[in-house]
Image: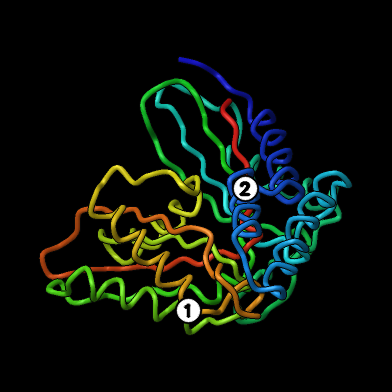
Amino acid sequence: MRYVEAKKIRKAVKGLALKANFSLRKDILNALKKAYALEKKVSAKKVLKILIDNAKIARSERIAICQDTGMAEVFCVIGQDVHVRGDIKKAIIEGIKLAYAEGFLRKSVVSDPILRKNTNTNTPCVIHYEIVKGDKIRLTVLPKGFGSENASTLKMLNPTDSEDDIIDYIVEAIKLSGADACPPLVVGIGIGGTLDKAALLAMEAILKPLGKENPKRHLARMERLILTRLNNTGIGPGGLGGMTTCLGVNILSFPTHIAGLPVCVKISCHATRSAGCII
């Protein structure tokens, strides 16, 4: 049995929250640069250049990539041979709280969805736990902005619906968001399980690196088709038209019930931010 002090988790979460808000993921930045090189429309190219420059300035000056510093989601994958000394939930929440105070990051969380009073700490955060083999703890912090979150959607499709029907639903759902979700987008899709499982799969799909081939051939094919169709919509960077409405599409699937076909479309903006570490 390996022992880890809760304060070590608090420190790690704090560092990851700051890194995620200041440093755009390399795969996202590379995708923006690739889109800039391929883009032909002048206005779209200008938007992409601004986004690339913005990411560089945020990293070098340690300021927020986007004014919406999100509601933090923390993925905590714990090895079954690890024992945490202390309150792991409290440590994670404290880590987020410290990061948002130290980094002068906007605090956007309200204590109640109806009463709407700001907690002024950007906590509580959303925490996902998973137990796996081993004696390590893997932490990932994702500050999820709500311009794109508000455009996300989930639908219980008919189990007899085809791949084309699924793709049509996904594309139409994203087209409806137009420029509101701050394109170019990163799209995570969860298919299967129950309603809540599909939503979690879609969130996890956003964490997958862009451009990595899906090991499931039928899902890889769907990803390519969805990406092509989205980039043919003409919405473009900032909604000003152009070739790049979407930077990448990742799909995760899970077994489901014979009577169901849950599909969640999780939309993330050009400022898709996350950072992770292993303790």
Q: Quadrant of residue 230?
A: bottom left
At numbered mark 1, what does the secondary structure look like: helix, strand or loop?
Answer: loop
Q: Which residue is mark 2?
A: 30
Residue closest to the eye, 116 or 48? 48
Does residue 122 appear in this view? yes
Disc 1: which residue: 233
222 to 214, vertically: above or below? below
What amino acid type should be assigned to the residue bearing mark 1? Thr
Q: Which residue type does callout 2 highlight?
A: Asn
> Residue 191, percent across and down?
29, 61
Q: Residue drawn at (52%, 29%), measured in percent from left and top? A: 137
Quadrant of the snapshot with the C terminus: top right
Farthest residue in the bottom direction?
176
Front in this rendered view, residue 63 or 8: 63
Residue 3, horizontal then vertical, whole percent: 55, 19
* Residue 124 appears in view: no
- Residue sitting at x 53%, y 81%: 177
Residue 86, quarter of the rendered image: top right
Residue 181: mark in rendering: none
Q: CA distance from mark 1 to mark 2?
A: 22 Å
Is residue 255 rendered to the left or right of residue 27? left
State the residue at coordinates (84%, 51%). Answer: 57
Work out which residue is located at the far top of the displayed protein and give it. 1
- Give the vertical position of 89 relative to 221 (above or below): above
Q: Residue furthest front?
A: 40
